[in-house]
Image: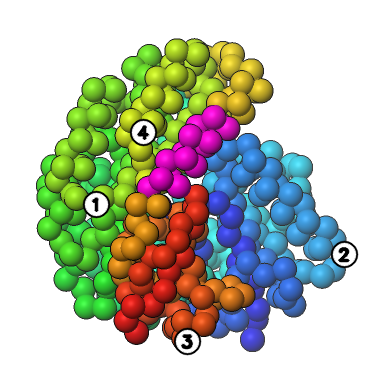
Amino acid sequence: MKKINVITLGCSKNTVDSEHLMARLAAAGYNVVFDSDRTDAKTIVINTCGFIGDAKQESIDLILRAAEAKKAGRIERLFVIGCLSERYADELRTEIPEVDDYFGARTWDGIIQALGAAEDEELATTRRLTTPKHYAYLKISEGCNWKCGYCAIPLIRGPHVSVPMEVLEEEARKLAAQGVRELIVIAQDTTYYGIDLYGRRMLSELLRRLCRIEGIEWIRLHYAYPAGFPDDVIETMATEPKICKYLDIPFQHIADKQLSAMLRRHTKAEALTLIDKLRRTIPDLALRTTLLVGYPGESDADFAELEAFVRTVRFERLGVFAYSEEEGTHSALRLRDDVPEEVKQERVERIMALQREISLENNHRRVGRNERVIVDTRQGDYYVGRTQYDSPEVDQEILIPTTEGRLQRGRFYHIRIVAAAEYDLYGEVVQQ
């Protein structure tokens, strides 16, 4: 049987794309492995990230290593797909000609035909999971219409395109039949879902339909743009028990001058009003956000305003990145990258130091609580699990000693939290 190794870099959206491709390859008779550097596969497909500098360099380094393996005869065919080749296919063909072909994030038909993968339409909702079998990402739309000043996603992925609701329901049912218990709903902006297909935002209706699928116990929402956040989504999150009390909503900044420069479509006042509404309507909500520091023109006063925002809102989860110029974006074309690199890094460190304090205080308040936990894996002397307030790979974990008994991956347990650290909790089994 032909063996093929599919290696995925970048975000969870790339993960979903690779899983769809792997299902088609398997249906065509391939023996598919993924993310393996110890394989005798003679064909390699690298699904690349092209979003920011570090991710692009990681993709290029991996392509170069694979090209060397091809020159040495260890592999026979090498294909590159995804975001990096969407942006830089011509340059890559010139610089790394050992690659058999390059296909972008919007040219999936090409890689399917090049590999002789199955083209049966019934496979459109079928995936070969690369995540642990109890959770999976559900990508509900592609692309983005917002065109924020720093972001290359619209250049790479194109405008917003929703996946029809019945297609998503079928895909979710198939995932549940495979043993998936947690669906992580993703898109560049989940709240924009449906406008292009149905003439209005339909995320609330989609979430309610997903809640009706037997076998799915948790539904988690990622990447919700703050502007125009639908009130009916807030109501659905508050009333549907399967929807985790968790929301990933990247604010990026809070100073109005910076929000305007970033071409964000909301103000500081609107962001604070939304946060207040979310927390009043959805008790015990865990808010995750992403911030961007060092954007062109960010003054000391702008950064102080951002620090005060973090200190006041006390996000349960927070990530922060230093601005890096991405060619073709508004900021690269129109603005000067005028914040020194050392200042950017200092601001990252200051926000993260503040967030560590907040996270530790938040975690200490959870000691003594009983929480429902899903077990992801075992590491050494601990089982590693998560509550509804934590998404896999990006958020904190609950560590349960193996002396508590044998726990099964993908099962839910009632756990009492007995101790807290900055980004970890420790628990003991209350009920098997």
The numbered dot on residue 126 is none
Q: Which residue is mark 4?
A: 251
The residue drawn where x is 65% and y is 23% is 341
In this rendering, the answer to whether 270 lies above or below 365 is: above
Q: Amino acid at mark 2?
A: Ala
Q: Which residues are magenta?
A: 348-363
**Nearer to the camera, 200 or 383:** 383
Q: Earlier in the sequence, mark 3 or mark 1?
A: 1
Q: Amino acid at mark 4?
A: Phe
Q: Can you tell which of label 4 and label 1 is closer to the viewer?
A: 1
On the image, the x and y values in percent for residue 336 come to 56, 13
In this rendering, the answer to whether 120 lies above or below 219 is: below
Q: Can you tell which of label 2 and label 3 is closer to the viewer?
A: 3
Q: Is residue 247 visible?
A: yes
Q: Earlier in the sequence, mark 1 or mark 2?
A: 2
38 sits to left or right of 183: right
Q: Secondary structure at mark 2?
A: loop
- C-beta proximity under 8 Å, tags 2 and 3: no
The numbered dot on residue 406 is 3
Q: How is the image coloured?
A: rainbow
The numbered dot on residue 72 is 2
Q: Amino acid at mark 3?
A: Arg
Quadrant where the C terminus sits is: bottom left
Label 2 to label 4, Cα distance in Å?
Answer: 47 Å
Label 4 to label 1, Cα distance in Å?
Answer: 20 Å
Q: Earlier in the sequence, mark 2 or mark 3?
A: 2
The residue drawn where x is 25% and y is 45% is 191
Q: Amino acid at mark 1?
A: Asp
Q: Earlier in the sequence, mark 4 or mark 1?
A: 4
